[in-house]
Image: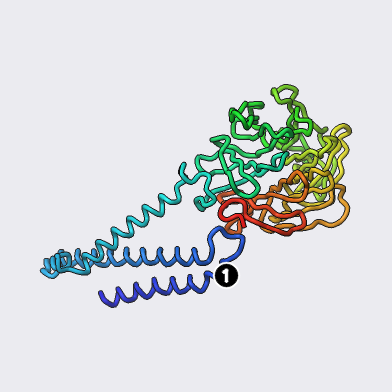
């Protein structure tokens, strides 16, 4: 028994020592918890596991001795049985600590606007207000919904409760458009009452600069040719435009039949149109096409120009000169006309949005080193367009 206890204690201690020496390598901006917090978590976890193992060993020994009708088994759990009492208190402590830890991870009303939220929280789809005073975003914190926060990280509040994605601010700054499983909503910030504008499988609303219409995305069926075989049907995302009262729904651009980047004519990648964003004057619209190709199209003629930048989730700067986008899990900026080289301004992020003066970008910051859309938590960060002054907006201190 004593040998088993010492072996168990040694194994738990080895794990704690390994965590201690591995913790410094964890201290990067890509992770939500620091190396110190990781070590403390590992130490407490192993202490709990050690106590549980202690209780299990004690229970096994007591059961065996009872089954053998050994009088020493009764002494094991008697008032004088120190080992038994220590095991009971240890198991009770582990149970209480586990309950407290689980309760701390549950989203609640008390911490819904706090910078410190549960590890699984996702803050996403940020959009800067036209006057630059607020940033709106969708989130899973609290019961989920749309929140607004000042660029300095203060005065966070919820303006809509419920499922919401693809947040976009109206040009006059009075309303927000967003999507959920029912369709596209428009909500005035003052009264917080969302209006269902477009019902169905529409997503990614983007306000037209005149404030009278929305560009939206919908998967549409079509008959296209395969690379080297007979035609076959598939769905591909396409950009539509709709008035704010839900009328006048129409396809914005004619269906494309040519190649886009490396995608062959007629392929899913070549005809796909998603993540729309208008130019400041409304004459063009940029979107993600092909397999990570950013295309700018003239709204009237439909003429398309590939900007020469490969990426996702484009955002046109208010001065019309630049386009920010996600480039292989980082945030990049390039000239809207395709000239010059792209400039990486932040790592581990995407879905950027410009400040009204075209000097700052707010973006999703991928946490735990992940850039996928599964269960990876995400926060919001702000960075200068030249790549300097990176600071955290949510999930902890803003500096």
**In the rendering, at what x and y percent does residue 365 appear?**
63, 53
56 to the left or right of 166: left
Q: Quadrant of the C terminus?
A: bottom right
Instruction: Give the left or right position of residue 63, taking residue 335 as reference.
Output: left
Residue drawn 53% across the image and 66% down it: 35
Q: How many numbered callouts?
A: 1
Of residue 32 and residue 61, the one placed in the foreground of this image is 32
Task: Relative to 162, say whether 121 is above or below.
Answer: below
Determine if residue 233 is in view. no
Whether residue 364 is visible to the viewer of this picture, yes or no, is yes
Q: Secondary structure at mark 1?
A: helix
Measuring from the top left, give residue 57's x and y in whole percent.
27, 67
How was the colour assigned to the protein in this rendering?
rainbow
- Say which quarter of the image contains residue 137: top right
Is 363 located above or below residue 26 in the figure? above
Against 156, is 189 above or below?
above
Image quarter for residue 2? bottom left
User: In this view of the protein, which residue sits in the foreground, 3 or 13?
Assistant: 13
From the image, tell me which residue sits under label 1.
25
The quarter of the image holding the N terminus is bottom left
Dot 1 alpha-carbon crowd within 10 angstroms: few under 14, some 14 to 19, many 20 or more: few
Residue found 29% across the figure and 60% down from its top: 91
- What percent of the width, then of the height, locates residue 157? 56, 40
Query: In front: 203, or 187?
Result: 187
């Amino acid at each position: 028994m004593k040998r088993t206890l010492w072996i168990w204690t040694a194994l738990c201690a080895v794990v704690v020592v390994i965590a201690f020496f591995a913790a410094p390598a964890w201290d990067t901006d890509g992770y939500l918890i620091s190396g110190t917090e990781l070590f403390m978590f590992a130490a407490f976890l192993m202490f709990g596991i050690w106590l549980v193992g202690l209780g299990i060993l004690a229970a096994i020994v007591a059961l065996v001795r009872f089954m053998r009708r050994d009088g020493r088994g009764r002494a094991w759990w008697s008032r004088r049985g120190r080992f038994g009492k220590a095991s009971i208190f240890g198991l009770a402590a582990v149970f209480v600590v586990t309950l407290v830890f689980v309760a701390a991870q549950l989203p609640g009303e008390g911490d819904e606007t706090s910078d410190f939220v549960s590890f699984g929280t996702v803050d996403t789809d940020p959009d800067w207000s036209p006057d630059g005073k607020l940033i709106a975003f969708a989130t899973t914190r609290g019961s989920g919904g749309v929140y607004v926060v000042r660029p300095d990280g203060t005065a966070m509040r919820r303006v809509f409760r419920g499922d919401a994605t693809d947040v976009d601010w109206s040009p006059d700054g009075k309303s927000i458009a967003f999507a959920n499983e029912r369709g596209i909503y428009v909500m005035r910030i003052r009264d917080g009452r969302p209006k269902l504008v477009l019902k169905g499988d529409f997503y990614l609303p983007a306000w037209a600069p005149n404030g009278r219409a929305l560009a939206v995305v919908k998967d549409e069926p079509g008959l296209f040719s395969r690379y080297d075989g007979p035609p076959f049907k598939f769905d591909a995302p396409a950009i539509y435009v709709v008035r704010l009262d839900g009328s006048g729904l129409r396809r914005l651009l004619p269906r494309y039949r040519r190649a886009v980047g490396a995608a062959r004519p007629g392929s899913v990648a070549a005809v796909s149109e998603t993540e729309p964003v208008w130019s400041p004057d409304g004459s063009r619209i940029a979107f993600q096409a092909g397999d990570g190709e950013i295309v700018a199209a003239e709204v009237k003629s439909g003429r398309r120009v590939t900007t020469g930048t490969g990426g996702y989730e484009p955002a046109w700067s208010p001065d019309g000169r630049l386009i920010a986008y996600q480039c292989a899990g980082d945030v990049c900026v390039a000239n809207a006309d395709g000239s010059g080289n792209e400039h990486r301004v932040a790592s581990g992020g995407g879905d950027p949005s410009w400040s009204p003066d075209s000097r700052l970008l707010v973006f999703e910051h991928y946490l735990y080193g992940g850039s996928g859309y599964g269960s990876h938590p995400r926060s919001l960060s702000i960075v200068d367009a030249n790549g300097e002054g990176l600071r955290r907006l949510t999930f902890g201190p803003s500096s």
